[in-house]
Amino acid sequence: MNIDNQQKAHILAEALPNIQMYRKKTIVVKYGGNAMINEELKEAVMRDLVLLSTIGIKVVLVHGGGPEINKTLSKMNIESKFVDGLRVTDEETVNVVQMVLAGKVNKDLVCQIGNLGGHALGLSGMDGHMLKCRAVDSEHGFVGEITDINMDAVNEILEHSWIPVISTIGYDESGNCYNINADTAAAAIAGALKAEALISMTDIVGLCRDKDDPSTLIHRVYISDTPALIADGIISGGMIPKIDSMTQALRQGCKKAFIIDGRVPHSILMEMLTDEGMGTMFRITK
């Protein structure tokens, strides 16, 4: 779509109230899926985050890296196993997860933000004793359930107007590393920061009454409505734990949460800086 300078100016002017609403507030972006493995989408996401940071919004990026982990495990002839949507993580696998997430994926994102003129610092949940964990259960091995969270390092970075880029691994008192579900980690961080918004980038348009029909997108959901939506089968499967995580973030002080389509370039800007939005917004009360 080609637009002239007057149209560009009009779009910027229309965005002003939303910019003012979010300025100096904190947003947490959970990043993964196709938006992470498609280079064009990846650049669009990083460009959006740099823009938001530049206009005075405090941005926290929380990322997974499942496809990159799978690729590395395959090269090492280690089979990827999943139970109930969570990666079975033995001692050998968790070492790979730590290497890929806290190493390659994290530093690639930090570098790309820097190349676009932003300022980012890479962290993992082990840094600054950020995400303390215990094992979810014996079946999943080193998959972590967060038991304590420390946002001191993140708050310090935000105070200097930098973007913390956080990989989703945690620790225990014995020094073990744990793989944490990215939705769970992002929600815990958003709640602890009392963030203005948690934005979850997914491979769907949002929550739809008919999952195969994007035109049935539900634009706004209140947490009190979710039991009925689950009973009706509208929220089902892997969407249930995702929305459970968002519910916890909202109950811990995050103001609102969004599910948006990470396959659409600049979807973060469309959700945050336009009145129409593009995904599904979750709130505690009406």
Image (cartoon, grey):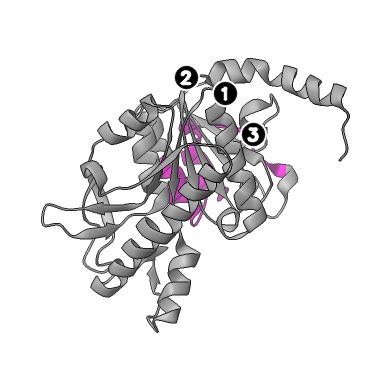
Residue type at numbered disc 1? Ile
Write down the residue under mark 1: 55
Please report the residue visible at 63 percent of the width from the left and 57 percent of the height from the top. 39
The disc, 1 or 3, on the residue closer to the chain's N-terminal end is 1
Q: Which residues are magenta?
A: 216-245
Under tag 3, what secondary structure? helix
Question: Label 2, on which residue?
Answer: 24
Q: Is residue 89 above or below residue 206?
A: below
Residue 121 location, x and y as percent?
A: 39, 42
Q: Residues within 10 Å of mark 3 (few under 14, many from 20)?
A: some
Tell me if residue 236 is in the magenta stretch. Answer: yes
Spatial distance from mark 2 to mark 1, Cα to Cα? 9 Å
The answer to whether residue 211 is seen in the rendering is no
**What amino acid is found at the position of numbered circle 2 in the picture?**
Lys
Neighbours of disc 2 within 10 Å: few (<14), some (14-19), many (20+): some
Horizontal side, residue 89 vs residue 196: left or right = left
Residue in front for this viewpoint, 164 or 69: 164
Q: Is residue 210 above or below residue 67?
A: above
Q: Position of residue 179 (x, y in %)?
A: 31, 59
Q: Residue furthest bottom?
A: 77
Q: Report the residue at 44% width, 40% height from top.
A: 120
Q: In the image, what residue type sits under mark 3?
A: Leu
Please state the horizontal and vertical placement of residue 146, each as a whole percent of the image.
26, 47
How far apart are labels 1 and 3 at the CA level? 12 Å
Which residue in the protein does label 3 denote?
269
